[in-house]
Image (tube, rainbow, N blue to C red):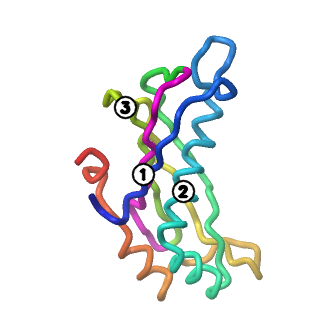
Amino acid sequence: MSTSLSRVQLRVRGYHLDGYGHVNNARYLEFMEEGRWDFFDQHPEMINELHQAGRAFVVVNLNIDYLAAARHGDDLEIMTGIIDVGERSGRCHHRIVRKDGTLVAQADLTFVLLDVHANKAAAIAGEVREALTRLTLSKEAFVA
């Protein structure tokens, strides 16, 4: 397993459910955010690099494929990793898999680095770019 791949275990609780008895679509956003927080918890140097450079990680686009329902009591694994770093944006990939191996949802998230002083997107360059690039992995790492 790559150390660049975050893995969070989560049990579906009653408050995650909608009136149909399965996880509400908006909850998947929270599950994926939990994965991103865990990713940065595992790489505190990345947060330090961003803060020192006056940058913040900002989500600008999220495309989710919902593939199977998750229900009360299901044990899920949320996998998160960076799959691409460009000049001005990058992409994270998320996979949510039920304990039985069923792929429940997957998403590609586009992010930019906000220059917190200028309040606008900044180029991904220098030490921050090097740090992000070191953590980049392929989508195949999510199924290995």
Q: Quadrant of residue 16?
A: top right
Which residue is rendered at x = 65% and y = 33% of the image? Answer: 26
* Picture layout, residue 73 above or below residue 96: above
| Vertical relation: 93 (above or below) 44 | above
Sort mark 3 into few (<14), some (14-19) or many (20+) by Cα contacts within 10 Å.
Answer: few
The earlier-in-sequence mark between 3 and 1 is 1
- Find the magenta span and give its range: 72-87
Q: Which residue is mark 1?
A: 7
Q: Quadrant of the N terminus?
A: bottom left
Question: Depth check: 120 or 96 in front?
Answer: 96
To which residue does mark 3 refer?
Answer: 99
Is residue 1 shown left or right of residue 42?
left
What amino acid is labelled 2 in the image? Arg
Disc nearest the viewer among 2 and 3: 3
Query: On residue 36, which mark appears?
Result: 2
Q: Which mark is residue 50?
A: none
Percent coordinates x, y for residue 110 in the rendering: 53, 55
Closer to the camera, 7 or 64?
7
Q: Secondary structure at mark 3?
A: loop
Question: Who's the residue at 40% across and 31% down the image?
Answer: 98
Identified by mark 3, the residue type is: Lys
Say which element carries label 1: strand
Residue 81 belongs to the span the image colors magenta: yes
Looking at the image, do the residues carrying marks 3 and 1 touch, with CB atoms under 8 Å apart? no
